[in-house]
């Protein structure tokens, strides 16, 4: 059984980390601005699942294998860069008032992919979670609990940021000109995230 004191120490630390602006938060902000609050929450859900998967992978020991092979990390990184640039192009093309609504899983899938292709998240989970793991207890359940807590906190925080952006964006999106502007802003955010990921050090 996980030590309650350890969990209590982990929760504020994970909350502080989730409150730090980063790629996940900016992605949800852009989703909310362009597609509305519902899409922002769906994207945040995908990101939360990604955090949980990263924790599960770390618990299985696979993250250590990935971290030991920089070439694999670079491959994951460039897949993420390409995906973000593709989203930027989509935003430019869809920055108009008659954009159709996304399917329920669309934003969720995008958030999941963006999170899973960020090698910084892999290295962060690998370095952060083991500090709270008790080696005398089964490892996998501990990683899953910590991953669930990390994902839940991120879901609330990132979703809230996207929701606030989406509330303003949807009210202004009735204007065709402003809707095109929203598309350009979202494309700019995705491009900056791609540039940030491309220049990130993974070693």
Image (cartoon, rainbow, N blue to C red):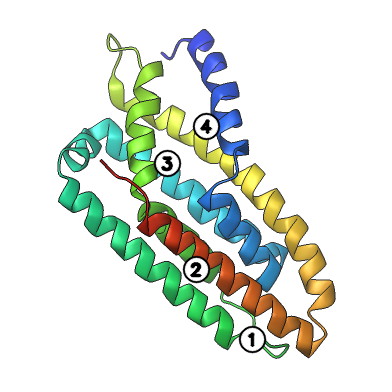
Q: Secondary structure at mark 2?
A: helix
* Mark 2 lies on residue: 191
Mark found first going from the N terminus, 1 or 3: 3
**Residue 75 versus residue 35 in the image, above or below:** above
Query: Residue 60: where, in percent of width, then height?
Result: 23, 34
Question: Which residue corresponds to mark 4?
Answer: 149
Q: Which residue has dot 3 on it? A: 52
Between disc 3 and disc 4, whose residue precedes? Answer: 3
Q: How far from the left and from the top, in percent, is residue 108? A: 52, 62
Quadrant in the rendering for residue 91 = bottom right
The answer to which of marks 2 and 3 sits earlier in the sequence is 3
Query: Do the numbered discs 2 and 3 sit on residues whose CB atoms are within 8 Å?
Result: no
The CA span between labels 2 and 4 is 30 Å
Q: Residue at x 28, y 39 (%)?
A: 57
Residue 105 visible within the image:
no
197, 6: nearer the viewer? 197
Q: Quick one: label 2 or label 4, which is nearer the N terminus?
A: 4
Q: Which circle marks residue 100 in the picture?
A: 1
Circle 3: element type:
helix
């Amino acid at each position: 059984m996980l030590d309650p004191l350890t969990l209590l120490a982990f929760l504020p630390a994970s909350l502080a980390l989730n409150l730090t602006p980063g790629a996940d938060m900016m992605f949800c902000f852009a989703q909310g601005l362009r597609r509305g609050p519902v899409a922002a929450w769906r994207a945040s859900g995908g990101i939360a699942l990604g955090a949980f998967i990263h924790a599960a992978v770390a618990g299985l020991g696979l993250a250590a294998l990935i971290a030991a092979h920089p070439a694999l990390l670079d491959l994951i990184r460039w897949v993420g860069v390409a995906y973000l640039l593709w989203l930027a192009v989509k935003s430019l093309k869809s920055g108009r008032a008659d954009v159709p609504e996304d399917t329920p899983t669309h934003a969720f899938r995008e958030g999941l992919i963006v999170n899973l292709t960020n090698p910084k998240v892999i290295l962060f989970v690998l370095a952060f979670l083991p500090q709270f793991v008790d080696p005398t207890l089964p490892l996998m359940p501990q990683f899953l609990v910590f991953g669930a807590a990390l994902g839940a906190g991120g879901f609330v925080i990132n979703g809230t940021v996207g929701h606030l952006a989406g509330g303003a964006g949807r009210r202004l999106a009735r204007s065709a000109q402003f809707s095109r502007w929203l598309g350009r802003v979202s494309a700019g955010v995705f491009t900056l995230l791609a540039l940030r990921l491309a220049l990130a050090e993974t070693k």
